[in-house]
Image (cartoon, rainbow, N blue to C red):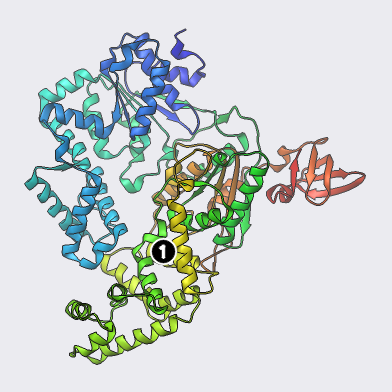
């Protein structure tokens, strides 16, 4: 047997030996999809005499492409495989554009340049919006969605702007590119597709070169990418796709899981292979994950088996709020470290990056080394945060003219730009200088005096009370709602940011203390101890960033309705909910050995319900199967004991345990769920 076929299970072997025609491999988490792809490449070359240069392997990230190439290099027995084409969609298509159309890298608008261009276009339309970097990123995301889905700007509901405004920005941006002879990353895909569709001779050459196409993570493909790949694959259709519809979590980027779900219709008679052996996760965690994802309807039904044994049950426990949640996770990790665990064993996964603030604060207090896989600036660089800080600084007597300018019309006080600029140039008492200019009506004058009184009151308040005052008395929350309405976007994300700011300000006696804390956090985050240096650190990440990774122990936090699933408004569709369920499934299946799920009872001072996914997860757990008569346990109160009998009934399993001559009857589910007992 060829070396590339060694140690493969039956399903993997069937996939690797596939040669001609379309093939769809459904690969659940931890089932060895990379092994299948690299082994198939080797088998095509070594056993089927396929020329390496006729093989194209497409991935969705440079890291995945490099790993695939490296794994194949270790597997292959010959240097013949060095001519296999590995790359992302962008890198493969750029090479074709460079070869046939003379595209140059110096004409590429990179991500930073695109951001600055869009920002300048937005500034011309609405100057106040240009400072909101998150808003600019959302606009770019919407633009990319329109391109990747091959839809028009008017055919979908923008999450960042009114559709007419988005369309105008896109048209101006495209005009700028045409006039300057530039292109961006999205153009690489669309330009390549157009080239192939319009130039039969080029298409013929590309088809003759890439006769065997393998696509990794196929569930993440979008319409534009698929149209190009489908065109190249014809008429041989030697297209081999590996993916898992249950891990399709990038709908907001334009990923279309329906392409995978409809693959058999697109390619009648294609081979379909299920990889069902999981090499990562214990059976208890895997069963819990499957119990959740089976609630989705629009999917391929799958069964997964594990080679890792039963393992411990997922531990689900409640905490009072998100601050206590973070400290509880930190304390538990510290305790496990004392039992000879490594920090690198742990990952903390959350639905939104906003949740990282409380976790980072707790980890800094506990001295836990960590790295974040998402944007490190999180809440403290948000424009709403900068607004609130300007209010607090002015209230504490620490502000300057820039702070007045920032908050003057947040909420609206109807002070014109000319008046603000004149007051700035005068360099005196800013508010007095505005009044002294004259020409103000009663509404404007009242607004100035109210602001002055508000700032005086803020100076004597604790930070949390001050933030509440800014929100409710000065009218900042109403300003955010008006802001969202004017842009045609949801208020949920904006209000969550200010709620998080209020939460972060709790526990400080003065505004000065709070500001000192923020400076200390910023300084510590910049220190090498807390960045990517070294490997022995806890990984913090969103559920999206967790995809493709695995850890010994995983904490999933903030598992409450409104957050997990993250539903922005009442109009959320079943499609949105199913993607949220897939996202939770991805988070659960990152755990190799232990899974902890936390449920805060309150969020921002309000009661919240446990996520619906918790009930789905716990449906599958058979607590009585975890123990047997004669097994030794440790009880938090009664200490060591031996199970004498397992009593099954319709309501709850119970156990009778002999604790040194004293026999106790215990509710097994309650004891295991709340970690009152552990098996020894």
Around disc 1, counting alpha carbons within 10 Å, would you say few (fewer than 14), some (14 to 19), or many (20 or more)? some
Q: Residue at x 50, y 38 (%)?
A: 535
Q: Is residue 559 visible?
A: no
Q: Residue at x 30, y 70 (%)?
A: 483
Q: Residue at x 62, y 44 (%)?
A: 314
**Residue closest to the far left:** 179
SS category of the residue bearing label 1: helix
Tell me: 56 left or right of 649: left
From this view, report whether residue 192 is shown above or below residue 607: above
Tell me: 491 left or right of 91: right
Count of numbered tags: 1
Q: Nearer the viewer, residue 555 or 219?
A: 555
Residue beneath disc 1: 497
Q: Position of residue 442 (x, y in %)?
A: 25, 92
**Residue closest to the far front:** 427
Q: Residue at x 87, y 45 (%)?
A: 659
From this view, report whether residue 469 is shown above or below residue 201: below
Q: Please state, as top left, top right, bottom left or bottom right, where the C terminus lies in the image.
A: top right
From this view, report whether residue 223 is shown above or below residue 173: above
From this view, report whether residue 350 is shown above or below residue 629: below
Tell me: 82 left or right of 364: left
Q: Position of residue 123 (x, y in %)?
A: 19, 63
Q: Nearer the viewer, residue 605 or 11?
A: 605
Tell me: 519 left or right of 91: right
Q: Position of residue 655 (x, y in %)?
A: 80, 44
Q: Nearer the viewer, residue 141 or 533?
A: 533
Q: Position of residue 409 (x, y in %)?
A: 28, 77
**Residue closest to the far right:** 661
Q: Is residue 274 visible?
A: yes
């Amino acid at each position: 047997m060829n070396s590339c076929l060694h140690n493969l299970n039956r399903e993997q072997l069937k996939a690797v030996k596939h040669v001609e025609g379309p093939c769809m491999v459904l690969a659940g988490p931890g089932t060895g999809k990379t092994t299948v792809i690299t082994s198939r490449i080797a088998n095509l070359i070594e056993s089927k005499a396929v020329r390496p240069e006729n093989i194209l392997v497409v991935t969705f990230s440079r890291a995945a492409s490099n790993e695939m190439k490296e794994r194949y290099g270790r597997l292959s027995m010959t240097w013949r495989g060095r001519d296999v084409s590995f790359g992302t969609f962008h890198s493969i298509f750029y090479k074709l554009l460079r070869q046939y159309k003379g595209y140059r890298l110096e004409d590429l608008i990179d991500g930073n340049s695109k951001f600055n261009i869009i920002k300048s276009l937005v500034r011309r339309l609405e100057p106040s919006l240009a400072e909101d970097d998150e808003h600019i990123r959302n606009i770019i995301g919407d633009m990319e969605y329109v391109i990747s889905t091959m839809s028009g700007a008017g055919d979908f509901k923008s999450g960042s702007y009114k559709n007419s405004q988005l369309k105008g920005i896109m048209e101006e941006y495209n005009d700028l590119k045409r006039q300057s002879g530039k292109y961006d990353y999205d153009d690489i895909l669309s330009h390549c597709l157009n080239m192939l569709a319009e130039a039969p001779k080029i298409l013929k050459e590309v088809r003759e070169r890439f006769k065997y196409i393998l696509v990794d993570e196929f569930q993440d493909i979008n319409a534009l990418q698929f149209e190009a790949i489908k065109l190249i694959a014809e008429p041989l259709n030697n297209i081999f796709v590996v993916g898992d519809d249950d891990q399709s979590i990038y709908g907001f980027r334009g990923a279309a899981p329906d392409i995978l779900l409809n693959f058999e219709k697109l390619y009648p008679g294609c081979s379909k292979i299920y990889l069902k052996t999981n090499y990562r996760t214990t059976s208890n965690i895997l069963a819990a994950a499957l119990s959740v994802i089976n609630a989705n309807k629009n999917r391929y039904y799958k069964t997964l088996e594990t080679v890792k044994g039963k393992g411990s049950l997922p531990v689900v426990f409640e905490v009072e709020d998100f601050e206590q949640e973070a400290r509880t996770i930190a304390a538990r990790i510290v305790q496990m470290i004392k039992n000879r665990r490594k920090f690198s064993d742990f990952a903390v996964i959350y639905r939104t990056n906003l949740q990282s603030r409380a976790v980072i604060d707790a980890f800094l207090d506990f001295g836990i080394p960590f790295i974040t896989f998402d944007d490190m600036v999180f809440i403290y660089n948000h424009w709403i945060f900068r607004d609130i800080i300007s209010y607090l600084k002015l209230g504490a007597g620490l502000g300057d003219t820039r702070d007045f300018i920032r908050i003057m019309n947040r909420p609206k006080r109807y002070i014109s730009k000319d008046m603000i600029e004149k007051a700035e140039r005068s360099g005196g008492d800013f508010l007095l200088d505005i009044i002294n200019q004259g020409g103000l009506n009663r509404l404007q004058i009242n607004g100035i005096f109210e602001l002055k009184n508000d700032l005086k009151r803020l100076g004597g308040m604790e930070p949390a009370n001050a933030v509440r005052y800014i929100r409710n008395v000065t009218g900042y929350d109403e300003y955010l709602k008006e802001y969202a309405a004017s842009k045609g976007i949801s208020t949920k994300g904006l209000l969550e940011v200010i709620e998080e700011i209020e939460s972060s300000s709790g526990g400080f006696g003065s505004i000065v203390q709070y500001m000192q804390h923020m400076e200390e956090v910023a300084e510590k985050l910049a220190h090498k101890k807390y960045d990517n240096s070294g490997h022995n650190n806890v990984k913090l990440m969103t559920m999206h960033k967790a995809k493709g990774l695995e850890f010994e122990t995983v904490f999933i936090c903030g598992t409450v309705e409104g957050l997990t699933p993250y539903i922005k408004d009442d109009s959320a569709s079943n499609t949105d909910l199913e993607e949220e369920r897939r996202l939770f499934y991805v988070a659960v299946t990152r755990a190799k050995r232990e899974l902890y799920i936390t449920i805060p009872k309150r969020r921002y001072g309000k009661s919240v319900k446990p996520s619906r996914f918790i009930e789905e997860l716990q449906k599958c757990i058979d607590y009585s199967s975890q123990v047997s008569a004669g097994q030794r346990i440790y009880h938090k109160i009664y200490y060591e004991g031996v199970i004498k009998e397992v009593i099954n009934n319709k309501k709850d399993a119970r156990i009778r345990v002999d604790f040194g001559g004293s026999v106790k009857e215990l509710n097994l589910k309650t004891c295991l769920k709340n970690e009152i007992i552990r098996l020894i």
